[in-house]
Image: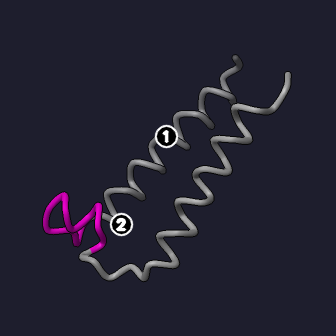
Amino acid sequence: MSTIDWTILIFTLVAVVVYGVFIGRGQKNNESYLKADNKMPWYIVLLGIMATQASAITFLSAPK
């Protein structure tokens, strides 16, 4: 990999960590983070589960 590739990779990894710390700064504990203080409507959780399942199925079934 070239220097520009390494630079972009490291920048992206640092940006993801910084964004996660920024977003998670108001969380009180792990349960508050994982369950969103029970404020998420059921249909949003359903869409997230369906999207994760579709992504996994697509990844596993895609021929190479």
What residue is shown with label 2?
23
| Residue type at the position of mark 1 | Leu
Of 41 and 1, the residue lying toward us: 41
Q: Residue at x 58, y 69 (%)?
A: 47
> N-terminal of the two: label 1 or label 2?
1
Is residue 15 placed above or below 61 in the rendered structure? below
Q: Which residue is mark 1?
A: 13
Q: Position of residue 33 (x, y in %)?
A: 26, 64
Picture quarter with the C terminus: top right
Q: Is residue 8 left or right of residue 2?
A: left
Q: Quadrant of the N terminus?
A: top right
Rounded to the nearest angstrom, the CA distance separating label 1 from label 2 is 16 Å
Residue at 74% across / 41% down in the picture?
Answer: 58
Residue 20 lies in quadrant = bottom left
| Residue 36's disc number | none
Relative to 8, residue 52 above or below = below
Q: Is 49 rendered above or below residue 10?
A: below
| Prevailing secondary structure class for the magenta stretch in the rendered image | helix
* Magenta segment includes 52: no
Looking at the image, residue 56 sits to the left or right of residue 41; the answer is right
- Residue 40 point in image, percent of width and height: 38, 79
Classify mark 1: residues with Cα within 10 Å, few (<14), some (14-19) or many (20+): few
Q: Secondary structure at mark 1?
A: helix
The residue at 69%/31% (across/down) is 60
Judge the density around disc 2: few (<14), some (14-19), many (≥20) Cα neighbours within 10 Å: few
Residue for point 59% across, 34% down: 9
Q: Which residues are magenta?
A: 25-36
Q: Secondary structure at mark 2?
A: helix
Q: Can you name the residue that lies furthest to the right here? A: 64
- The reply, left or right, for residue 58 in relation to residue 32 is right
Residue nearer the viewer, 12 or 41? 41
Q: State the image quarter where residue 12 is shown.
A: top right
